[in-house]
Image (cartoon, grey):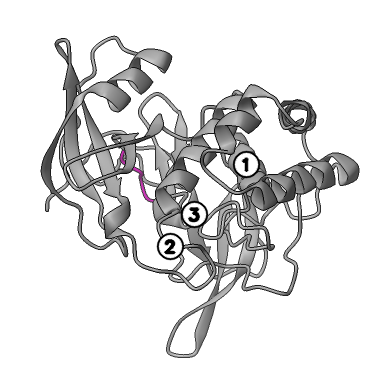
C-alpha cells in the first residue's frame, strides 16, 4: 500500500497516547507490505481523539528458531518500557492489546522526515530534508562527522565503506540496543521525525538471553560511554532490581531468564563504561542491512 498519512492525535502526549492506543477503537485500513510478519496500518480513536498506528497481531508472526513462538509483540512493548526509563524516548508509544485479529502490538505511527542525499539541501519530496544517517563511501576511512561500520560489497567486485553519522541521537540508540540485545537494527528501522527527534522501530527480536546484538551502529564499539549514557545505565540498574514496578511490567512480557540476562547486560555496561564490541559468535550486521 502507498505510504499513509498520519492522522493527528491533537494534543495528546505521554500517558494520554498510551491510553488511546490501549483503549481506543482500532480500525484496520491496510497492510504494510515487505515485512516478514503481518504489519497493519490502522487508526485508533476514543473520545474524539484519533491517531494513526501500526498493529502487529501475534497471529501474524512467523516462527523463529531462536525465539519462542508468539512472543515478538510483547518484546516490542518491553523495548518501549526500557526506552521510557532511559528518558530518551527513542521508541514510539507501544502497547499490547486485543485487536481485530487477536492480541498484538499497537504502536503510534511516526511520520519520518524526508532525508536528503549527502550534500543536497532537500529531501526526497523536494522539501528541506534531514541530514543522512547512513551512507556508503569509497574512501578507506570515514570523513568528519561519520563513524565506520564495515566494508560492504556493492557489485562488480567493488567494495565501499558503510558509515553512520556521528550523531548523539544514534549513539543513544546504540546504547539502548546494547541493553535490549537488539538482533535487527537496520537502516529502515531509524525514523528521524520532524523537529529533529529520532525514533527506532521494529524491536521484536530483542531480549534474547544469548548475545544476539546485530546492528548498523557499531561506530562507537569499544569507545567510552558518554556521561549521559553512564547516568542512564546506572538508573537502569536500579530500576531493574527485583520487585520494582519496571520488573513487574517486564515479567508480563519476557521470561525471568531474559530479565536476568537484561540485568547482566546493564551490569556489564556499568562495569566497562564502554560501548560493546561484536562478540564474534554471531553475525554483527543485520541482513539485509536496510
What secondary structure do most residues of the magenta stretch adopt?
Answer: loop
Measure how far apart labels 3 and 1 are at the Cα level: 18 Å
Reading the image, the residue beneath label 2 is 69
Q: Closer to the observer: label 3 or label 2?
A: 2
Task: For mark 1, give the secondary structure.
Answer: helix
Separation (CA) of disc 3 from disc 2: 33 Å
> Could you tell me which residue is drawn at 51 percent across and 55 percent down?
185
Instruction: State the residue at coordinates (39%, 54%).
Output: 188
**Horizontal placement of 252 versus 5: left or right?**
right
Q: Which residues are magenta?
A: 113-118
Q: Position of residue 68 (x, y in %)?
A: 49, 62
Question: Which part of the image, by quadrant, shows the C terminus?
Answer: bottom left
Depth check, front residue: 222 or 106 = 106
Mark 2, other Cα within 10 Å: few <14 / some 14–19 / many ≥20: few
Q: Position of residue 65 (x, y in %)?
A: 50, 73
Disc number placed over residue 271 in the picture, else none: none
Point 17% across, 38% down: residue: 42
Residue 176, label in figure: 1
Disc 3: which residue:
134
Q: Image check: 53 left or right of 276?
A: left
Q: Residue, x 22% and y 23% (percent of image)? A: 24
Does residue 143 appear in the picture of this structure?
no
| Residue 244 in magenta stretch | no
Asked whether, in this view, residue 23 is left or right of residue 261, the answer is left
Camera-side residue of 174 and 159:
174
Q: Position of residue 141 (x, y in %)?
A: 67, 64
Q: Earlier in the sequence, mark 2 or mark 1?
A: 2
Regarding mark 3 in the picture, which secondary structure is present there?
Answer: strand
Gap between marks 2 and 1 measured at Cα = 24 Å
Q: Is residue 36 visible?
A: yes
Mark toward the viewer: 2 or 1: 2
Amino acid at each position: 500500500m502507498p505510504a499513509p498519512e498520519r492522522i493527528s492525535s491533537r494534543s495528546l502526549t505521554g500517558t494520554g497516547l498510551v491510553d488511546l492506543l490501549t483503549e481506543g477503537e482500532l480500525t484496520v485500513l491496510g497492510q504494510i507490505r515487505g515485512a516478514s510478519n503481518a504489519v497493519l496500518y490502522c487508526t485508533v480513536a476514543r473520545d474524539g481523539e484519533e491517531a494513526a498506528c501500526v498493529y502487529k497481531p501475534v497471529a501474524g508472526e512467523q516462527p523463529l528458531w531462536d525465539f519462542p513462538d508468539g512472543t515478538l509483540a510483547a518484546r516490542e512493548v518491553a523495548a518501549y518500557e526500557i526506552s521510557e526509563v532511559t528518558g530518551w524516548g527513542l521508541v514510539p508509544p507501544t502497547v499490547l492489546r486485543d485487536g481485530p485479529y487477536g492480541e498484538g502490538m499497537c504502536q503510534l505511527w511516526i511520520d519520518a522526515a524526508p532525508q536528503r542525499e549527502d550534500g543536497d539541501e532537500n529531501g526526497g519530496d523536494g522539501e528541506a530534508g534531514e541530514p543522512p544517517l547512513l551512507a556508503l563511501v569509497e574512501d578507506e576511512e570515514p570523513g568528519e562527522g561519520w563513524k565506520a561500520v564495515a566494508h560492504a560489497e556493492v557489485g562488480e567486485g567493488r567494495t565501499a565503506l558503510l558509515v553512520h553519522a556521528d550523531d548523539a541521537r544514534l549513539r543513544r540508540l546504540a546504547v539502548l540496543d546494547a541493553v535490549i540485545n537488539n538482533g535487527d537494527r537496520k537502516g529502515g528501522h531509524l525514523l528521524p521525525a520532524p523537529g529533529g527527534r529520532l525514533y527506532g522501530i521494529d524491536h521484536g527480536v530483542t531480549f534474547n538471553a544469548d548475545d544476539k546484538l546485530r546492528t548498523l551502529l557499531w561506530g562507537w564499539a569499544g569507545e567510552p560511554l558518554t556521561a549521559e549514557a553512564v547516568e542512564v545505565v546506572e538508573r537502569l540498574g536500579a530500576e531493574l532490581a527485583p520487585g520494582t514496578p519496571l520488573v513487574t511490567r517486564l515479567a508480563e512480557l519476557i521470561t525471568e531468564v531474559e530479565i536476568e540476562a537484561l540485568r547482566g547486560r546493564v551490569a556489564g555496561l556499568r562495569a566497562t563504561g564502554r560501548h560493546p564490541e561484536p562478540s564474534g559468535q554471531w553475525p554483527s550486521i543485520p541482513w539485509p542491512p536496510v
